[in-house]
């Protein structure tokens, strides 16, 4: 029952903000007659981390023991960067977070797993009820900051889980760098896909979708969104349906079944 309530809340929350964001982008683009990616991705000083304005505290990350994963003050163009955008339960409960249906959300364990694979991991605990539109723009600015500092787009990967995957997908629609990598975990529920397709928004870059076959409450196939996006900025794309049987809970722990494909996607063979 709780899982169903969480699913309905997440669908309503992300669908509303997605529609609002797409409408805002359409109006802004038409008014300025310049590409969306350019109008929403202003150049930043390479060594300056992106920060929210004091006018909107909804965007401010929560102070926690995860401060070592904050956006770096100094940028190494030779490093490989991975953004991990967590699920909604971390917004609701903070750290630690526990679901009676899926168990503990091992946020720090997931970050450590990616770090062991050699990435500079960037992640932050979002405040409760984070505005998807505002946080997506924050992520876009941080990614553009890395690129402006000389980091090749192919060395940047955005991994989003559940609500975090919605944010990652929206960032993919905005950034439009063909070599940037994205991993969408537990996303593409049919209700959300219908909203995305109706809006005409598309994915760009290299996109991998991963979800468990038993997760029919929160997840689904991204294939229809891939089809819509082909020839419109989408590069490499693939989908993995896990056979773990844990449903949405598979994303709560750093299981090799999804960690290793995500790492491989971020480090493609030459």
Image (tube, rainbow, N blue to C red):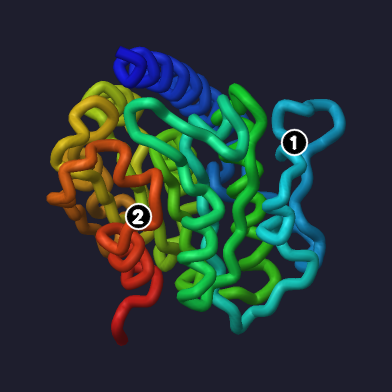
Q: Nearer the viewer, residue 57 or 180?
A: 57
* Image location of residue 167, percent across then percent down: 48, 39
Q: Nearer the viewer, mark 2 or mark 1?
A: 1
Q: Quadrant of residue 145?
A: bottom right
- Residue 174 visible (yes or no): no
Q: With 79 as the anchor, is 195 left or right in this view?
A: left
Badge 2 local density, few (<14 within 10 Å), some, or many (20+)? some
The residue lying at 53 percent from left, 59 percent from top is 111
Say above or below: 173 vs 76.
above
- Tell me how far mark 2 sits from mark 1, CA to CA: 31 Å
Quarter of the rendering occupied by the N terminus: top left
* 165 relative to 76, above or below: above
Q: In the image, what residue occupies the spot 60% across and 47% down? A: 139
Residues packed near mark 1 inside 10 Å, few (<14), some (14 to 19) or many (20 plus): some
Give the x, y percent position of residue 7.
34, 20
Q: To which residue does mark 2 refer?
A: 233
Q: Taking 72 as reference, is 64 above or below it? A: above
Dot 1 corresponds to which residue? 60
- From the viewer's perspective, is residue 231 above or below residue 222? below
- Residue 245 visible in rendering: yes
* 137 with respect to 158 (left or right): right
Residue visible at 71% across and 33% down in the picture: 59
Identity of the residue drawn at 52% across and 48% down? 107
| Place of residue 199 in the rendered image (x, y in percent of width and height, measured from the top left) | 35, 26
């Amino acid at each position: 029952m709780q899982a169903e309530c969480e699913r309905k809340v997440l669908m309503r929350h992300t669908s509303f903000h997605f529609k609002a964001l797409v409408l805002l982008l359409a109006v802004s683009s038409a008014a300025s007659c310049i590409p969306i990616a350019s109008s929403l991705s202003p150049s930043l000083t390479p060594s300056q981390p992106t920060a929210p304005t004091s006018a909107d505290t909804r965007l401010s990350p929560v102070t926690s023991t995860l401060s070592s994963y904050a956006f770096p003050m100094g940028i190494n163009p030779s490093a490989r960067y991975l953004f991990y955008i967590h699920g909604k339960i971390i917004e609701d409960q903070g750290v630690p977070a526990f679901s009676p249906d899926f168990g503990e959300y091992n946020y720090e364990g997931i970050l450590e797993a990616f770090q062991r694979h050699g990435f500079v991991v960037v992640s932050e605990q979002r405040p409760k009820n984070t505005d998807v539109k505002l946080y997506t723009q924050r992520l876009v600015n941080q990614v553009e900051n890395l690129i402006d500092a000389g980091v090749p787009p192919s060395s940047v990967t955005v991994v989003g889980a559940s609500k975090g995957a919605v944010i990652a997908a929206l960032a993919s629609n905005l950034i439009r760098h063909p070599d940037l990598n994205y991993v969408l975990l537990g996303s593409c529920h049919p209700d959300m896909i219908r909203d995305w397709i109706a809006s005409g928004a598309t994915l760009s870059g290299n996109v991998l979708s991963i979800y468990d076959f038993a997760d029919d409450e929160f997840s689904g196939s991204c294939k229809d969104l891939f089809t819509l996006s082909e020839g419109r900025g989408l590069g490499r794309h693939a989908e993995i349906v896990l056979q773990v049987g844990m449903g949405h809970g598979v994303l709560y722990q750093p299981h090799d079944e999804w960690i290793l494909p995500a790492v491989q996607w971020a480090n493609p063979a030459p």
